[in-house]
Amino acid sequence: MKDRAPWRRRSFGTVALAAILALAACKSRGPGAESKTEIKIGATLPLTGSEARIGGFYKEGYDLAVEQANAGGGLEVGGKRLPVRFTLLDDTSTQATAVSLADRLVNGDKVDFLLGTYASHLVEAQSTVAEQNKVPYVNGGGGATQIYRRGYKYLFGLLAPVELLGSTLMQWIDGEQQAGRLPKPSRIALVWENTAHGKDFRRGVQEFAQQRQGAYPIVVDESFELDGKDFGALLGKVKASGADLFLADAHLPDYITMQRQYVSAGLCHKVVSYGARGSEKGAIDALGPDNVLYILSAVWWSPQLAERQGGLAKDFVEVFKAKYGGRTPEWYQALGYETARALFTAIQQAGKVDREAVRAKLAEMKIPSLLPGGQLSFAADHGQQAYYPFVVQQNLPGGRSPLVFPKEVALAEGVAPNPRCAK
Amino acid sequence: MARLLDLAISAILLAGLYATMAYGLGLIYGVLRVVNLAHGGVIMAGAYLGWWLHDRLGLDPYLSIPIVVVVAFAFGAVLYRVLVRHLPRGAAGGPASLLLLFGVWLVLRNGAYLLFTGNDHALRTSYSTRALPFLGTWVSVNRVAVLAIALVVPAALHVLLRRTYLGKAIRAVAQNADSCTLVGVDVERIYTVTFGIGTALAGLAGLLSATLFAFNPAFGAGELLKSFVVVVLGGLGSIVGTAVAALILAVIEVFAILVLPSYLTAAVGFVMLVVVLVVRPGGLFGERVLG
């Protein structure tokens, strides 16, 4: 018995120490969020590689949002201001790098939250890392619906589904048909890039056409590989089909190559669209203003919304121009900015730097937005992908590309049928 | 019938482009037995040089052909003298040359990113979308020009290789470099010139591509792959074979749309490549060296 007392004393001491440590650990985990001195947010973007141009645009949006957040001392979290420490890495436009850098940000740099990269294939791969580590991942660069069909809880997307791009274009076309400016039925040549983006676009057009029962027969339904060198055979098929409407979905280089061949082949359709492409300066420079006239395009955001929608869209355009030497933002910068702003808002609403609390706030978010429609929420029935209308613009004479649809934000009347076909 | 005619014209014009892209690769392999992985990078650089000459100096792309060819030749010659000639010859040099030239390609690509960013560029002239009427259809002026150049290049190479001392020396070195050294041919000089000509042809292909497509620093990878298919199909080292293989590949790819979805037509060429490698590894035109 005598020699058991020291052991008991040691045992009691050990247990007491363990209890104190456990209590300390609990204390630092619970209110630990409040004891934080900063909010660590990590992101990767394709700053080099094939998507570098657009990655640079998203960076401008992120930088502006972070600058604004830190301007007043940081985000207001639980009654005090916490500065945002933003770590941005270059994923070189490759999936493997995007994944490994996200892993480094979460497990090496110990960031609290992640902002997404650009391009659907990169977001799809990278968001898995966030999901595995239970880190809220808010992105404005992945529009493919398949990304959001995986049942991920921590993934939130601001790009509306590409299907809506196709269906929004069709809504405008439908209005023109009902006004008697397009024939009924209008035969569609549907040409889409063989990617998730292209497939979603096709689905949007197909589903709309099916709903209208016979008003829009699809007479050509063909896909093509990215960076095509010759669309002669494909355009030959379009020509032979006698289609009234030419609806394509293409990235910028393919749009330029295809439209050059389209014009050279003497083709002309009552409505011509390349999906989200059409009004880019690069395309106008490459093709000439005359060769892009009356092309219809639908995008996620336009600076013209500042004029008609006002509010946050107008504020954003003003602060962007002030920061970047009067340059007008494109939809890429707007989506980058809004993505960061959505995450910051959720952190403030949660009142603590806690991943679960912020995830919950993102899931139930409904805030005023600079996006079309003026509201942002992450629709649960769409896998937490935002769902809002696209805006349609058309290249018109005089180098203008005004918004023509939806009517609430339209700055001009769209033109159909294509007057060039009459020449 | 009109549809078939359209397809035939498309195929011939596409063949011109494929052939132009592949000549340089075939020539360098035929003489030096080096697979020039920097070929794609030089195609990209040729596109940028043509665009820069047009954008900054207002030079028409077809008038800038001599400048692009000379610059690309000089680059190729320097590349050979400074790097490639130090590689071991024969089979031992294979992996080393692949790695080295792949590295050169990466340097070219990243140099372009630094200089021009990742933005897409395109070369636009007053005739970029102009077309000529031909048998009831329209044919792009630029595509016709590329086809014409694709026909001139093998003819010029033929004259060079058959009618000049330099050409005879190139053929001799391609057949047996050691014997050439014994009879006083400066083999290193011939290698330098050949590498320069092959690189110049890649630069020319880049310039011509720039008149047809938008490009960025990643441009050239698809072109290199297509060039490989054409060169292997035609028979490594055969210039005439390269031209004929380009035509075969283009015809099959274009006419495949009659039976296959459009996105699968590009794969037809690669299927052909596999079949040729299995059935006739020397290519359709055998292992002729610069024949």
Image (cartoon, coloured by chain):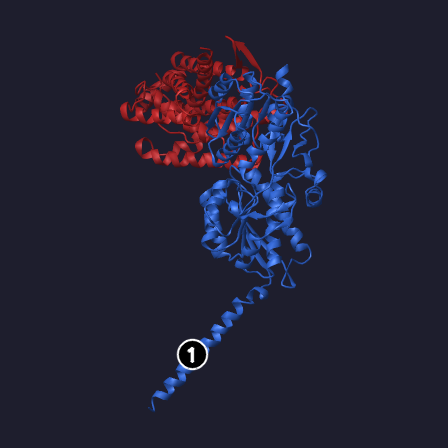
Chain colours: A blue, B red
Tell me: residue A355, above or below residue A29: above
**Residue at 44 percent of width and 44 percent of height:** A96
Q: Is residue B178 left or right of residue A305?
A: left
Asked which quadrant contains residue B162, the reply is top left
Residue B152, position in %: x, y? 46, 13
Q: Residue furthest front?
A: A213
Q: Secondary structure at mark 1?
A: helix
Q: Residue furthest bottom?
A: A2
Instruction: Assign the C terminus of chain B to one quadrant of the image.
Output: top left
Tell me the kind of residue under disc 1.
Val
Q: Is residue A87 left or right of residue B229?
A: right
Instruction: Assign the N terminus of chain B to one quadrant of the image.
Output: top left
Tell me: residue A269, above or below residue A31: above
Tell me: residue B81, above or below residue A119: above
Q: Is residue B52 left or right of residue B284?
A: right
Residue A180, position in %: x, y? 64, 22
Residue B173, position in %: x, y? 34, 21
- Report the residue marked by disc 1: A15
